Amino acid sequence: MAVQPEVQNKGILKSAAGIADDVFTRVTAGISAGEFRRMLRGEAPGRPNPRLKPHSESFILHIKPTYYHESVTRFTHTFRLGLLSTYLFLVETITGIFLMIWYAPSPDRAYSDMIRLLSSVPFGQFMRDVHRLGAEMMVAIVTLHMVRTYLTGSYKAPRQFTWFTGVLLLVITLFLSFSGYLLPWDQLAFWAVTIGTSMAEAVPPKIVGETVNLLARGAPDIGANGLLRFYLLHVFFLPILLILFFFVHYYKVVHFGISLPAAEEEVGQDSANKVPADRRVYFLPDVLIDEASFLIGFTALMILITAFFFQAPLESIANPQSTPLHTVAPWYFYWLQGMLKIADKMIAGVILPGVLLVLLIAIPYLDQNPSRRFKDRRVAIISGIVAGIVMIILSWMGTPQYAVRAAPAVEIVQELMPEEGAGLIREIGYAHMPLGTFDTREELHSDDPKFNEVLEEFQASVLHFDETDPDFNNAYGILEITQNQPSLKKIRWEIHWLSADGAEEVFRRAFFLHEDSLYWEQYAPRDFEFLQPAAEGE
Amino acid sequence: MQKPWYSYLYVKSPIVKIILGILGVMLSLALLLFIGLIDGPRMEAQTGNWDGRSIEKGAEIFANNCATCHGAEGHGNPGPALNSHYFFTQRLKDVGFTGSQQDYIELTVAAGRPSKANSQWGVMMATWGHEYGGPLRADQVVHVSAYIMNWEESALQQTAETDPWIPFQDTPSKGSPYADGAVAAEPVQPAGEPRPPQELFTAMACSGCHVLDQLQTDTNRGAVGPNMGNLPEEAGQFVAGQTAEEYVHNSIVNPNDFIVPGYQPNIMPQNFAERMSEEEINGLVAWLLDPNRQP
């Protein structure tokens, strides 16, 4: 480059400024420093619009539209749910790669890798929590995205195929989330996935179901092969499939434009791509600023939730020999579990979900009503709401609240001190467990208000079952806490009752609780008590 | 176009959006800084947490599988004591094991003590680890070892008198682990008051193999040694020429003289005459033959 003549002509400062401007323009793929300043000042672009250049120059921007219709940029039209879904996939990829560094998909190592991640890797727990939270949010947001599209009728012509790819993306998201469920190799993971894959077994005819099940698990039961297969599905096959369909989906979105609010169009018209010049909102800078600040705000919210209100669970190591009481699927599969409780595995686990999927895909072809306005779509809106309510009821039926209550004595103990997970006793912890014997027939009182809560809960729960269950009469419970070892307490539950025919029955269960053990609920304020002893030690 | 009621929520100004974005970045960074600052104590707490949970799991395994021989408190009977000063300080030196205490425990749990000739211990320890055909997975062996290791703190406070350890006859102790220099107590002949038979029955580990409140019948036989529920009635009928008292006395002092059909010789320790005084043995015999004995 001929620097010297330029310096001679313009002087050193001016030519330096010219070079700086040149670099700036290259970095921003076509926006000069002056244009950038004008953007920030909120000035209108000149003609021809110099702010379109980055859309042809840069790869990332060339897939974004250069301008949007003003009406679709309103937050309450789309709620930015599609953008959020995409963003969450990015978050999952980044945190997932971090987690992959500390993880080996083998039953010998997977679980101890999780413990190592939690206890020895800086930011390890944070990354795991964000990954888990992001996964659950992604399922929720992709679903909400579909609900929004349904309610605004945006699946109608010409966007039927966009809807189809969207349904596929929803299914892939569910499978992604579910395949990741197995990887920690704890009881929660193992049994949820065992139940999940057992539905594949119900696919008729028998030979197909068995083969699918065998292919998924890699053996008649989930083991080393099954874990490896789920790992590969989770980190390789499904993400690639998702990326592929995402691009098809997004291409269609850009191609047809985001559908306008129904009120702004004539029925049967689609004018999303014919944006009058005065209604255009350009991507640079308005939409970019909007999307960036929205995603930043969302990120801050995710970090906030992770820091204070969300902790990914980790239970005991997977044990094929013992099924914990009340094994539940992740919440987004509660509806499936609810159906499985009332119907046969083949009908509820295979045929109904299959029909549901086909129905979802077929919606644009079944619904021939050209109008997207609420008042013209009463049938569609009401059936959508009914379907939503049915889903919520089925989900409630999927929780242990419905139909799978164990014997009262077992439930009483399970509620306060479950086989897996936290429960009230483990949450308040070792320090709040006074030694002694506590009998629900007596006036119960201790010096510890937190422990009193447990006693009240215990008493109330025994009383509740005594009143409601005819096979559980004259019941009383004894809670005995003894020091088993230095820093280890034994918590023994004993529940006596008379059965319906007057026979004396007793249920005994003992647990141990260590001073250093921390148990947590997945969705609850985080406990920062561990900061206390460190402060005292100094 | 009419504005919806929530239109006040719309942020139109790009400058406000940029400011909100900057605030969002600052909030995120502040939160990350906070998480980073408490990450040290957090990792420490998590380490403690998983060690604690391991001990809890070990406690459950111990209570279900090991406590019958090693005692719920780890005081042994009929197996060796584990909650023992000697066990934590001197045992490894005496047997010449060069690994750590935890290694020793893990190895013993996993591989057991399946074959040992002429042992003073009534029952051989089974192999517990999966790799040796036992029921426990490797992680469970680690849990139960962690639980046993958790006794160390209380065991080290024991003195020669309170240590429940019963010396192994085939490995005499090479040193004293106790502060006062006492050698691991050889079975002591009690000098003063004779101990009550109930205490002897557990202290001498009889209870490990003989069940007091079960009848010994053809359909209900003790697994290792005969049940003693109907001993008062039956004791006179085993050996011709011996009264019930003579039979029970001789069975304690010279167990191999008569073995009840179906049981193995050399299971019952041979040294009770040295470990109890004559008076104590007689008391024990009388108590065992009392049809109304109090446990």
Image (cartoon, rainbow, N blue to C red):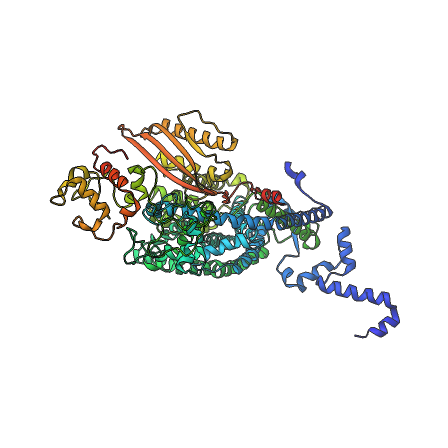
Quadrant in which the N terminus of chain B appears: top right
Q: Quadrant of residue B75?
A: top left
| Position of the C terminus of chain B by quadrant | top left
- Report the number of discs: 0
| Between A487 and B295, the one nearer to me in the picture | B295
Decide which of A323, A292 is in the foreground and name it: A323
Q: Residue at x 47, y 51 (%)?
A: A174
Residue A158 in sight: no
Question: Does residue B229 appear left or right of residue A119 in this picture?
Answer: left
Where residue B288 sits in the image (x, y, percent)? Answer: 23, 38
Residue in the foreground of this view, choosing between A402 and A205: A402
Left or right of A216 in this view: A378: right
Residue that extends furthest to the front in the rendered view of this protein:
B191
Report x, y in % for residue A414: 41, 38
In screen coordinates, is A275 left or right of A128?
Answer: right
Q: In the displayed image of the protein, which residue is found farthest to the left?
A: B240
Between residue B153 and residue B279, name the one nearer to us: B279
Q: Quadrant of residue B204?
A: top left
Instruction: Decide if residue A353 is in sight here.
Output: yes
